[in-house]
Amino acid sequence: MSSLVQAQQITKEYQTGPVKALALQGVNLTVSKGEFLSIIGPSGSGKSTLLSVIGGLCTPTRGSLKVDGFNVYDLPQEKLADYRREYIGFVFQQFQLIPYLTALENVMLPLVAAGLKNNQQVAAAKEVLEKVGLGQKTQRLPSQLSGGEQERVAISRAIVNKPPLILADEPTGALDSRTTEEILELLAQLHSEGQTIIMITHNPKVAARAQRIVEIVDGKIAS
Ligand SMILES: Nc1ncnc2c1ncn2[C@@H]1O[C@H](COP(=O)(O)OP(=O)(O)O)[C@@H](O)[C@H]1O
Ligand SMILES: [Mg+2]
């Protein structure tokens, strides 16, 4: 399979005043199109930083990131924003839904940014919410949904634009074991449909649901 992501010798040093934190130290990672990869490692090992680098949110101190053959951090600012919008669907542990927008409106957000007509936005958002089993709850606010349902809305928002790459940072970290199972099944279903997914977790059982596991320790790939 051809590679979608090629991270080469990625180093990231955060500087907070006089204090430096070396979050990533020469990480090499290749992800194939259609792969479901999990990244595991202890807290503070650099997992979220690596995902932010891949997602175009965090410029590495050294190293290069190629996605679909182009160098992401060689792009000018506005093209970098296009990259994030067109290539990446982000899913976070804390869902990060807008509290005063309905499930439908939350899922429509990336389509607003993409400049689609309103009726097209509604149709596309409804279709995805139906796919994740929330067809009857499109008008609910996040506070009127369970944690698992909120995460399904967050996943819907991430996939509605059909981005080539889903980046999920501890997507089941805030969920109980039964709901975790539902979310993992949904991710597995997306993967079976050809979606490329990179999922961070510190839970080995969750990680085992991916095709491949990469372990990161102290900012380095350990295995
Ligand atoms: N914005 C930031 N500013 C300064 N240090 C940071 C920042 N984000 C992360 N770090 C530091 O970088 C290291 C890796 O953090 P992170 O990538 O969040 O790890 P993980 O997701 O594996 O818990 C930690 O030492 C953390 O304190
Ligand atoms: Mg993290």
Image (cartoon, helix red, strand yellow):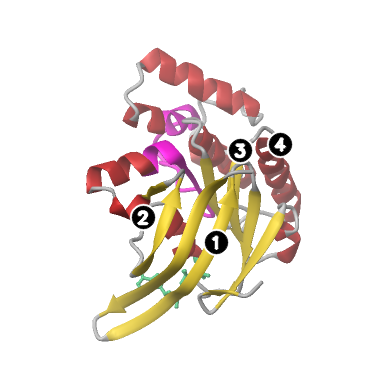
Q: CA distance from mark 4 to mark 1?
A: 22 Å
Mark in front: 3 vs 1:
1
Numbered mark located on residue 161 in the image: none
Query: Magenta part of the protein: which range?
Result: 84-108
Q: Which residue is at 51% across, 51% downward?
A: 5
Q: CA distance from mark 1 to mark 2?
A: 17 Å
Task: Write down the residue under mark 2.
Answer: 57
Mark in front: 1 vs 2:
1
Hey, what amino acid is under mark 1?
Leu
**Mark 4 neighbour class, 10 Å CA radius: few under 14, some 14 to 19, many 20 or more:** few
Hey, what amino acid is under mark 2?
Leu
Instruction: Judge: label 3 CB < 8 Å from ligand 2.
Output: no
Q: Is residue 156 left or right of residue 180?
A: left
Q: Describe the element under mark 1 as helix, strand or loop.
A: strand
**Which of 186/199 is in front?**
199
Q: CA distance from mark 2 to mark 3?
A: 21 Å
Report if residue 1 is visible in the image: yes
Provide residue 119's location: percent of width, then percent of height.
41, 13
* Quadrant occupied by the C terminus: bottom right
Hey, what amino acid is under mark 3?
Gln
Q: Earlier in the sequence, mark 4 or mark 2?
A: 2
Task: Write down the residue under mark 4.
Answer: 192
Numbered mark located on residue 195 in the image: 3
Q: Earlier in the sequence, mark 4 or mark 1?
A: 1
**Mark 1 neighbour class, 10 Å CA radius: few under 14, some 14 to 19, many 20 or more:** some
Numbered mark located on residue 29 in the image: 1
Provide residue 15's location: percent of width, then percent of height.
29, 77
**Which of 35/145 is in front?**
35
